[in-house]
Image: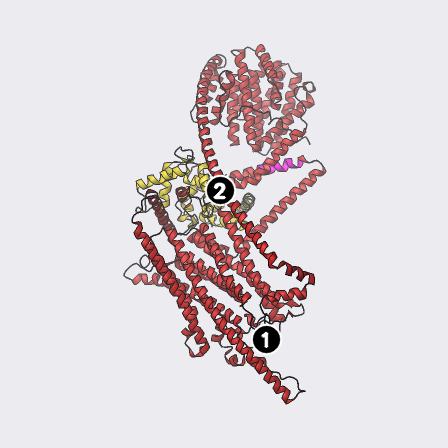
Chain colours: A yellow, B red
Amino acid sequence: FCGLLLTTAKYNLKLKTSTWELRRVNFRKSRSQNISAHKRFTELLEKHEKEQIDARVPIGRIITLPELKSNPFKERICQVFSTSEQKDGSLTFEDFLDLLSAFSDSATLEIKSHYAFRIFDFDDDGTLDCADLEKLVNCLTGETNDAKLSSTEMKQLISNILEESDIDKDGTVNLSEFQHVISRSPDFVSSFKIVL
Amino acid sequence: MVEKFFQDHERKMPRDSLITSENDSEQDADLSLQEEHESKTHRTKRRDGDRQKKKRRNERRKGGTRAGEGEEDLQAVSEKRERSKRKRAKSKQETSRRENNEEEEAQLTGGKGTKARKDIRNEKTRRMEKEEVREVDENVDKGKKKQGSTKKGEKKEDGGKQLVKEKARDIKKKKHKKAETSSEPETSEEDDDEEEDNDKDVVRPECLSPEELEKLKEAVDERKKLIQSLRGKPWPMKKKLVTLRESQEFVEKYEGALGKGKGRKLYAYKVLMTKKWMKFQRDFENFKTACIPWEMKIKEIESHFGSSVASYFIFLRWMYGINMILFGLTFGLVMVPEALMGRPYGSMPRKTVPRAEEASAMDFAVLWDFGGYAQYSVLFYGYYNNQRTVGWLKFRMPLSYFLVGVGTVAYSYMVVIRTMARNANESGVGDDNSFNFSWKMFTSWDYLIGNAETADNKFASITTSFKEAILEEQESHKDDNIHLTRFLRVLANFLVLCCLAGSGYLIYFVVRRSQKFALDGLENHTWWERNEVNMVMSLLGMFCPMLFDVISTLENYHPRVALQWQLGRIFALFLGNLYTFIIALMDEINLKRKEEKVVKFNITMWEASLYNGTVLENSTAPPVTIHPADVPRGPCWETMVGQEFVRLIISDTMTTYITLLIGDFLRAVLVRFLNYCWCWDLEAGFPSYSEFDVSGNVLGLIFNQGMIWMGSFYAPCLPALNVIRLHVSMYLQCWAVMCCNVPQERVFKASGSNNFYMAMLLVILFLSTLPAIYTIVSIPPSFDCGPFSGKNRMFDVIHETLESDFPPWFSKVFSYASNPGLVLPFILLMVLAIYYLQSTSKSYREANVELKKKLQMQNEENKRKNKRAALKAQMDLEEARKTAQEQQRNNNASVQDQEDDTDIHVSGQNPPPVGGRGSQMPSSRDSGSRTHDRGNHGPSGYLPGFARQTEPRMYRVPSLQRH
């Protein structure tokens, strides 16, 4: 019992220091927000994991969060913010905070667009090519079959998008092009938010 | 990343050294060793211990050098060195191999080795000129003929140097590495200085020269900048933390060193204070966010229904704030002074309930109608006395009343316009349509949506918007049967106009009828007849929008355009209703004024008779005191107007709440529970749940506010009522939305509409202040009620104050200033200024568009250029690599006969030349640079991101441990 107490105390200490440091990093995020984030995170952990300091929550449990549940990009979001070696999309508490800070009010347009780009870049190759765009459209139109666009519509759509945003005409949208497009958008910043 | 670079270099280093001469190898080995140390000391925090060890080692080496020609001595030294290194338990395989090599070389080279080692130091300090290197190389080459040819050796030497330079650059790139690495060599150099005085020309004392100080300052500044910009970097949290910690340590360590003595203390104090201040600011920020009311409620709604529904609640909160301030103004400056310091209730006729009404004055029905006691209280205009000053404070009551009325309107204008300007700034120039598809694609998902139904709706709306956009793109020119559409649109507008006219007439009719009822006396009529006006207005406001909605389906507009039309029509309807109401009120005011004249005449007659009577009866007795309730009085049209507005607000509020309860809650309950025993699916089919109608609600709010602005001059209680109403509706609507609404299908973008609402609010504000100002300016106030009674016009109170409370010169100046001869030119000037600003802003906008175009063109051009350059560079690189391979093969062949084992190792370690640019950057750089230096022929290969000119900077930054 004593050992258990000690570990929890240690964990709390570690948590305290880490939250404190995190607050210095993104200090517009208030402490209460951090603590509530931690609460939500520990809810996702299983009992034996709660004592570990750098416990990872697997992707399956992360996407059950009500804030992410109906998001079509939930898997991508997990994968982008995950620092795990196996690329399985599992998140540590730090990753989780990372996610929240990128989706918070105080994050800049640059950060938001950077992460949005990585979320949309389904094959992680650094550019949005036709396959990525197609996947993106399919994500946005939902899973149901009747809502899907026909292949000609899809082709038209993708060619239109490339025509608009592919400035160097290499058939893909890269990060700077993407940010250029996003920066003009009136409501990207207000909608690229997740609130716990 | 930093570690990776270092590992790369470590890997490269031995290879190079092994291929080339012993001297070179020793140089490189030493260098790399030091590098390794530094990186390690940096990574682990055992900096000091390492430094000491290194010092010791350096001393030993120096000793060896000085004494040193004896082979045994040297060997012993190197052995010691090796042992000490091993002790550190950090040595990797490569290190030990290198050391072995060194040992071997040391034995072989003897005296020349020492000289070479001095050269190493030179290179460390980056002071060495090329001639010297060559000289040494020649020496080395003369002395030892182990390698194939002198020329090759020289080239290798150059190659090695190049590598070091490269490394230096890499490290420079990594700012956090720089200082650490720079500090390390210094210590050793210090030792050099102390012990090797004869080598002064080579190793100069590294004092803190001003330029070096400058550099350090730069580094510290850069670190600080890094700390500040850290939040804006898309790095993972771990990296952020590590970088932050490192840079903070660095800054803390070296910042103090910049100032000396007193300055340092001051500096530390300053740093401390900044830290404290930052912390305070952070806490204050947290406190401020904690103070925002309903933040969590709105966030919750936002996460369920998306940002557009939340925008309504944010608007509601904003409205609440404004009303709080209006309420504060009227309450603090008008109501409370009059209630506390003015004459008490019952002291004069205007403050007493008349005898005829006394019996029913406390009835709830009367109070609910704001008659009886409510009518003769601070809530309404008529209660206020025209006493110039009240109480011991000499509070100018009428003036205050007037100024508060004006201030309310002025403040509202200011706030609305300021908010509009801010919104316009925020949205910027987001209205260009050049990225229509991309925005639909990349920004249409609302990440706040946390509700499955909302998500489904969003999916559907996105799909339709995609399809619509595609269709529009395809059929942008095709337009079928334009005549029918036109006809239908004209018809729809005609119908809407009919509706508007009909509703206007209905209201006018009802108001006139109610006046007739009022003349007859309200008691003889039914409840409906008494409340006809308000009910009709509310019902019209409820059903006409539905009618408009039906009509708008005729028009076949794009949903967004249709929504705007719909909003415009509802706006027109409300406005028409309001204005009909006001016109009817005007009629009533005129009636009252006629009545007033009669009453006034009667009163003079009555007073005269009273006076006559008293005079006749006994002249000495004090004048007969008549109870104020019995004194005849005028109708007081101002109070009547105020009452009308208050009633209107109350009925409007009631209608809103009841519609909410019946239309939303009851419907939801019915749908939910009848669904178990019904023939069709109620939830998905006809009645279903109601949507939250953002635009309708916002319009309702705006009109409510308009009525407040219009009526608050005659009923100071209106802002207070509105505050209560908004407070209640905040909770009620939050609850209703969460419990019985489904998200709307047609998604109205929040940010785009904000200014639309604001513009409507501004229009309403203007339109609602117009009648108020008209009544204030053109109608004389009632003679026996209100703060301005007895004056010809309400604004005379200003004149009066100017005359009696200010020095005469002031009123003179004021009268000059208000002279039309001065005012008119001033207005003209203002109009001109507005015109000028307008035209300049237009020209700026045009210039902006032009610049944007230019920028885009340039961007494209640049991209193309870069691409070409990159392609060319890649080709060059390929070529270079090929030659490098050949050279390597030759080289391998030449070295093979000497050191077989090492050679095997070299070829094993040599990375295969791969075409990939990005992933193989270090190796390709390595080979590219080597080829370049090896063959002085051919064009200098242009490598992207790799400037050839290097500066010996990193080894020169002075150490600070000396102080």
**Chain of the residue under the numbered disc 2 shown in the image:** B
Residue shown at 55% from the left, 10% from the top: B145
Q: Earlier in the sequence, mark 1 or mark 2?
A: 1
Residue placed under numbered mark 1 in the picture: B345
**How many other residues sit within 10 Å of disc 1, few (<14), some (14-19) or many (≥20)?**
some
Q: Nearer the viewer, mark 1 or mark 2?
A: 2
**Prevailing secondary structure class for the magenta stretch in the rendered image:** helix
Is B842 drawn above or below residue B493 in the view shown? above
Tell me where residue B625 sits by quadrant.
bottom right
| The C terminus of chain B - image quarter | top right
Residue placed under numbered mark 2 in the picture: B846
Task: Determine if residue B635 is in view.
Answer: yes
Tell me where residue B345 sits by quadrant.
bottom right
| Dot 1 amino acid type | Tyr
Residue shown at 61% from the left, 26% from the top: B955
Task: Determine if residue B662 is in view.
Answer: no
Residue shown at 47% from the left, 62% from the top: B704
Write down the region rendered in magenta.
B245-257
**Residue B428 place in picture, x, y as percent:** 49, 46
**Residue A152 place in picture, x, y as percent:** 31, 40
B246 inside magenta stretch? yes
In the image, farthest residue toward the right? B262
